[in-house]
Amino acid sequence: MLIPRDLWRELGGFDERYVNGCEDVDFCLRAAAAGRSNAVALGSVIRHHVSTSPGRKERDEANTYRFTLRWRATLTNLGIRRWCRHHFGAHLPEPRDFPDPKLARQAALYLLHLRRTPPPAAYPGMAAAIGVEIERWRAMF
């Protein structure tokens, strides 16, 4: 991760409540919320021993729970296109079984970038999917 020192200080660095996971993505979302851009160098190569830190995976669920609670609305917005793809794809094998043809049409147009906004049902649908995970974590912790 390459960032200007002043941005690191402005945002307070990594949130230390995350233990070995999610702190980098949390930082990037905080930077985006502050009006900064994030970019990924897809051609870059970093060589290291993956997951060799002691206890690397022990806090994954807790970190993801904390992260999802903090960024729930953002994650809902980021997941809208995937929700539309899933909803449309689930009914595609038998199009006559679409429960709501208008929603199917809106989802298809959105997926094809022929509609700028997702169908209104996509927001509560995505929020409900995230809610299922949050309830699972609540039961876990």
Image (cartoon, rainbow, N blue to C red):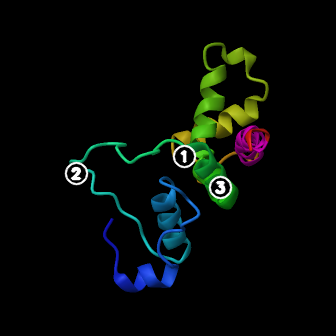
Distance of label 1 from label 2 (alpha carbons): 38 Å
- Say which mark, if any, is on residue 125: none
Which mark's residue is nearer the viewer, 1 or 3?
3
> Mark 1 or mark 3: which comes first in sequence?
3
Query: Quick check: 23 above or below 100?
Result: below
Q: In the visual, does 64 lie left or right of 48? A: right
Rendered location of residue 25, percent (x, y): 48, 58
Query: Quick check: 64 above or below 111?
Result: below
Query: What residue does disc 3 label?
Result: 66
> Can residue 117 be spotted in the picture?
no
**How many residues crowd around disc 1 within 10 Å: few (fewer than 14), some, or many (20 or more)?**
few
- Give the secondary structure at mark 2: loop
Q: Residue at x 20, y 50 (%)?
A: 45
Q: Amino acid at mark 1?
A: Leu
- Say which mark, if any, is on residue 114: 1
The segment highlighted magenta reads: 121-138
Q: Quadrant of residue 88?
A: top right
- Give the secondary structure at mark 1: loop
> Mark 1 or mark 2: which comes first in sequence?
2
- Say which mark, if any, is on residue 46: 2
Q: Amino acid at mark 2?
A: Ile
> Mark 2 or mark 3: which comes first in sequence?
2
Q: Residue at x 77, y 44 (%)?
A: 138
Q: Main secondary structure of the magenta part?
A: helix
